Image (spheres, rainbow, N blue to C red):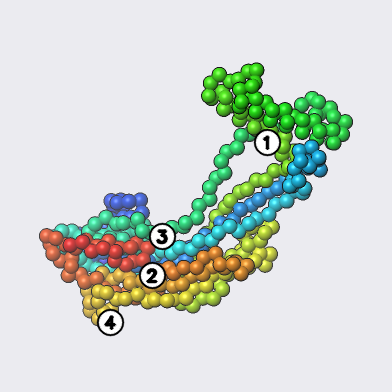
Amino acid sequence: MKKLLFISLMLLFLSATNAQTEAVKVTALKGNEYGLTYSLPKTMLNVDVQVTKITQKRGQFYQYAEKYLGVKDVITEDKTYWTLDNIDVWGKSVIDKDNTYFIQLKSNAAPFMYLTADGVICSINTEPDFSDVPKTHLSVEKPAAAAIIDKSSVMTEELLMASSTSKMAEIAAKQIYRIRESRMNILTGDADKIPGDGESFKLVISQLEAQEKALTEMFTGTITKESKMQSYLVEPEDVMNNFIVCRFSQHLGLVGKDDLSGIPVFITTKKTSEGENVFADTKQKSQKGIVCNTPGEASVKVTFSNKTYFDSTLKIAQFGSLTVLPSTIFEDKKNPAKVIFYPDLGAVKKILQ
């Protein structure tokens, strides 16, 4: 038996036809005594935490924003802080090394399996289906590229020669109003020179807007945002109350669960269902066939600072029970059964005859 297990494991790594990038095909042949080795998965909770780093910088003329531009809401001090935006939880499967099996599927049809790279069963006698594999609902979008302009290019000789900060602010404000007037004249057709084609028109307007933005930010300041997402794996328990996933600090962002500078992100789980054995009684040890999961379920809740960010019920492979898919369905040499599993749960998704 040990020899057969070794041969089958070698076939897993050395065989191969790739069906998809996530699966490997292994075939029951005479060389491996028509035996295949496979494993079932167990479910880990993948906790995705989305945060944003916000950096504020005050403008050099912030004290004169209301006087010259009529703007009151401006940044008055440099500041960097973080926000916790969202949390998502989904079931991520890993190999359950305690549930590895060997089966002989002798048949003239050379039965085969598709396994994940680490040996978890995906399908028998047909290609696997990964369309229902859970994944995060969160995404971190890169901010749209803004028009870049060298701020020194808007520092005119008159502005640089000003005798005081107040005078510089006054001159900068006048430049802003002149730019606005120029843009309006172009848009209304009142300018002496109007760009002749659409692309030139867009380019001129874009440059004017960039210059106005650069000058205005000297009064209002700037805000930049950088979003990030970090994932944590947690093994669920039948009852798990307020397990600390990580911690979050407004000043540092996400920190380790033992770093007391942050406030904890808690996860709570409770098994709510053990699944139903639909194929056979696993107490019948002599039952021959493919061992598979009937997943259970658990309620999963994630909170931070007394606010609930996630509250749902998820399928958990190891919270269910093991069942046996009888090998007799594969014994029809002309038309053996085809089985598709949920690769993340090790449960039967579809049986095709």
User: Disc 4 and disc 3: Cα gap in Å?
Assistant: 31 Å
Task: Establish if 283 lies above or below 153.
Answer: below
Residue at image coords 28%, 82%: 283
Between label 2 and label 3, give the one nearer the viewer. 3
* Residue 7 visible to an observer of this rendering: no
Residue at image coords 55%, 55%: 229
Neighbor class of circle 4 (other Cα within 10 Å; few <14, some 14-19, many 20+) is: few
Q: Which residue is mark 2?
A: 317
Query: Does dot 1 land on a helix, a strand or a loop?
Result: helix
Neighbor class of circle 2 (other Cα within 10 Å; few <14, some 14-19, many 20+) is: many
Q: Position of residue 94 (x, y in %)?
A: 41, 64
Give the mark nearest the N terminus, 4 or 2: 4
Q: Are marks 4 and 2 in contact (CB under 8 Å)?
A: no
Disc number for residue 283: 4
Disc 1 residue type (three-letter): Lys
Residue at image coords 44%, 76%: 271
Disc 2 residue type (three-letter): Ala
User: Disc 4 and disc 2: Cα gap in Å?
Assistant: 19 Å
Query: Does dot 3 land on a helix, a strand or a loop?
Result: loop
- In terms of depth relative to the viewer, which is nearer, 162 or 152? 162
Disc 4 residue type (three-letter): Lys
Name the outermost residue toward the right: 163
Q: Which residue is mark 3?
A: 134
Give the mark nearest the N terminus, 2 or 3: 3
Q: Are marks 4 and 1 in contact (CB under 8 Å)?
A: no
Question: Horizontal placement of 261 versus 21: left or right?
Answer: right
Q: Are marks 1 and 2 in contact (CB under 8 Å)?
A: no
Q: Which residue is mark 1?
A: 213
